[in-house]
Image (cartoon, helix red, strand yellow):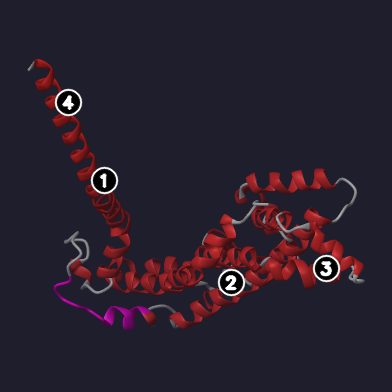
Amino acid sequence: MTTETTTETLTRTVATRRSSAVTWSRIRPLVIHVVLAGSALVMLYPVIWMVVSSLRPGNEIFRDPGILVKDLRIENYRVGWHALTEPFTRYLLNSALVVLGSIVGNLVSCSMAAYAFARLEFTAKKFWFAIMLLSIMLPIHVVIVPQYILFSNLGWINTVLPLVVPKLLATDAFFVFLMVQFIRGIPRELDEAARIDGCGKASIFLRIILPLMVPALATTTIFTFIWTWNDFFSQLIYLTDPHMYTVPVALRSFVDSTSSSSWGSMFAMSVVSLVPVFLAFLLGQRFLIKGIATTGIK
């Protein structure tokens, strides 16, 4: 009887553990999703609060930390659009010009530099590649003063040239390294086959390498768009005329000119400035993930 009782107890214990394991395996995905949703809500709360504040009267923005709108004020967007010396359309166009020039510059110069480091052979190649990687760790605050002096001597202050021209010289080492790793994952047999067909180095780059680099190019485009659109420090340094202000600089001067009486308008224009970044990430998310995931894989 003792042996039978022990066997029954062990059987019940095993069955209970199996039942608990099955129950937990069913509940676990729900728990994980609840935790992730809660974490996402906590991280998104400042953005949600800003959107809600753009629809509130100015005297209620800092009184209620909640995200429920009692008195909807759409006119914050209308007032904010014309609150500064120029319509907000001007600042959006200025930012778009700087972003477009930066994207084109990075795509052209960084892809060419990456092809040279990944495929071509030249003197001190490893040394210059190491220097390029070291420049990633160099803060912009270290070089901003000599750059400002140089651009001031060239008469480029208060123009978009200091913000766009350096991009044509492959100064963003991160994108060069990203593309180098991507090109290294492309089989060299394709280069050899193209060389047998009579293609030179330029033809191989334009006809073979560049079409295969679409994920890396898309990743560079998205990152350049987001970083340049949100850049405040460089644009504040080089742009002094309100007519040339970009969106980040305009938002800063928005606070200076309207003080605490138009917080709703300022938040409204902040929401407007976030829309292009949100759309860029939403539309390019597939290319962004693919470009990063395939970088360095052979």
Q: Residue at x 80, y 67 (%)?
A: 205
Q: Three-letter amino acid code at disc 3?
A: Ile
Spatial separation of the CA atoms under disc 2 and disc 1: 48 Å
The image position of residue 278, as x and y in percent, is 43, 69
Image quarter where the N terminus lies is top left
**From which residue to which does the magenta span run?**
69-80
Rendered position, 271 above or below 137: below
| Horizontal arrangement in the rendering, residue 67 relative to residue 201 (left or right) | left
Spatial separation of the CA atoms under disc 3 and disc 4: 70 Å
Q: Nearer the viewer, residue 171 or 107?
A: 107
In this figure, which residue is indicated by the disc labeled 1? 25
Spatial separation of the CA atoms under disc 3 and disc 2: 29 Å
In this figure, which residue is indicated by the disc labeled 3? 204
Task: Assign a secondary structure to mark 2.
Answer: helix
Rendered position, 49 above or below 57: above
Q: Three-letter amino acid code at disc 2?
A: Val
In this figure, which residue is indicated by the disc labeled 4? 10
Please state which of the two labelled residues, at mark 4 or mark 2, is closer to the viewer: 4
Tell me which numbered mark, 3 or 1, is placed earlier along the sequence: 1
Q: Residue at x 56, y 55 (%)?
A: 293
| Horizontal arrangement in the rendering, residue 217 relative to residue 91 (left or right) | right
Q: In this orientation, does residue 86 appear?
A: no
Task: Assign a secondary structure to mark 4.
Answer: helix
Q: Three-letter amino acid code at disc 1?
A: Ser
Tell me which numbered mark, 3 or 4, is placed earlier along the sequence: 4
